[in-house]
Image: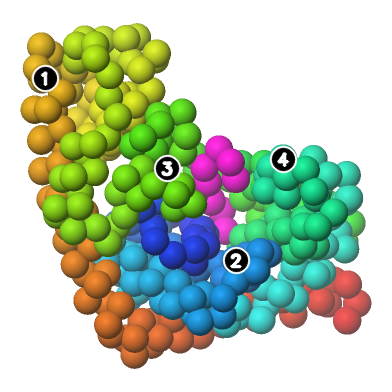
Amino acid sequence: MATKKIFSGVQPSGNLHLGNYIGAIKNFVNLQNEGNECIFCVVDLHAITVKQDPKILKQNIRETAATFIASGINPKKSIIFNQSSVSAHSQASWLLSCVARMGWLNRMTQFKEKAGKDKEKASVGLYIYPVLMAADILLYDATHVPVGEDQKQHLELARDISKKFNTDFNAADFFKIPEPLIQKNFARIMSLKDGTKKMSKSDPSDLSRINLTDTENEIINKIKKAKTDTNPFPTSIDNLKSRPEIENLIGIYSSLSGTKIEDLLNKFKGQNFSLFKEDLSELLIKKISPISKEINKLNKDISFIDQVLKEGSEKANELSSKKIEDIKKKFGF
């Protein structure tokens, strides 16, 4: 298979959890290890579409980079950098916003969800966020972008912008048309307290999620208290559809172990949920605890993280600076 050029970003929101790992970061590591050319960005410019505490944001940028590295992203194989340190992102965002159409942005459902009923008070940045995301991707001629279902519409916008730019400036191959890489299984990990809601750091209950920095005892306690039901362990995939909490826990087990769901159903058939939860806790500790320990270690080594981000930014700047100059020439600058 041909090597893909991958670009993806994670917001430095702090407190990354199991949902971020299974839904995104684990996939990043796989893409890197398959020999693809990978660029992973801490998208701190995206983070400021809502008000941030500057000190906490700086800390979260470093922690997100530490999580990348602790999870297996190798800065010698992949580029890791923070978006604000490469000026081409801001420049390209403005230039491409002059190509994007209002009608396209008005269709973005995520803005409507995040802005809520009082959208007049939302920042302009939140509204034009998808144009910056398009700039992030197009600057590096990315061929593929790992996205969740909630970001698929934004990637479609990036594709629309790239096509319109190429047409407007009579430059058929100037921008690559990026393809989505959508994880088919376990892209959305749900809350441990409510299987109908996505696992989120904004949930007021810490018991709703497994944080990547949780201790072994915290993992055991959270899985023990994770919501199930009074029915027996399911025996078929069809039986899972009406039991979201059970489906979520089995999905987590399947994703981390690489075991098919059908095989897990056969393995635990007739067993109590307590036995399944014990096994799941052991698996989580085996997979997550080494990451947790490495994150904690890296968080104390600020100079190392800053050096990784600096070197990554230099590489990203080298790639993006030529592209931004070429974009400017197309406009006549």
Coordinates of residue 68 in the picture (x, y in percent) = 35, 65
Circle nearer the N terminus (4, 2): 2
Question: Which amino acid is tagged 1?
Answer: Asn
Circle nearer the N terminus (4, 3): 4
Image point (38%, 72%), residue name:
63
Q: Which mark is residue 47?
A: 2
Question: Which amino acid is tagged 3?
Answer: Met
Which residue matches tag 3?
Answer: 199
Kindly report the distance in space between the C-alpha atoms of the residues bearing marks 4 and 3: 20 Å
Question: Which amino acid is tagged 2?
Answer: Ala
Circle nearer the N terminus (1, 4): 4
Which residue matches tag 1?
Answer: 272
Kindly report the distance in space between the C-alpha atoms of the residues bearing marks 1 and 4: 42 Å
Left or right of residue 3, residue 178 in this image:
right
Coordinates of residue 133 in the picture (x, y in percent) = 65, 59
Left or right of residue 135, residue 31 in this image:
left
Kindly report the distance in space between the C-alpha atoms of the residues bearing marks 4 and 2: 18 Å
Coordinates of residue 100 in the picture (x, y in percent) = 84, 55
Kindly report the distance in space between the C-alpha atoms of the residues bearing marks 2 and 3: 19 Å
Q: Residues within 10 Å of mark 1 (few under 14, many from 20)?
A: few
| Contact? badges 2 and 3 (CB < 8 Å) | no
Left or right of residue 24, residue 33 in this image:
left
Image point (36%, 82%), residue name:
305
Q: In the orientation shown, which residue stands out farthest toward the front?
A: 204
Q: Residues within 10 Å of mark 3 (few under 14, many from 20)?
A: many
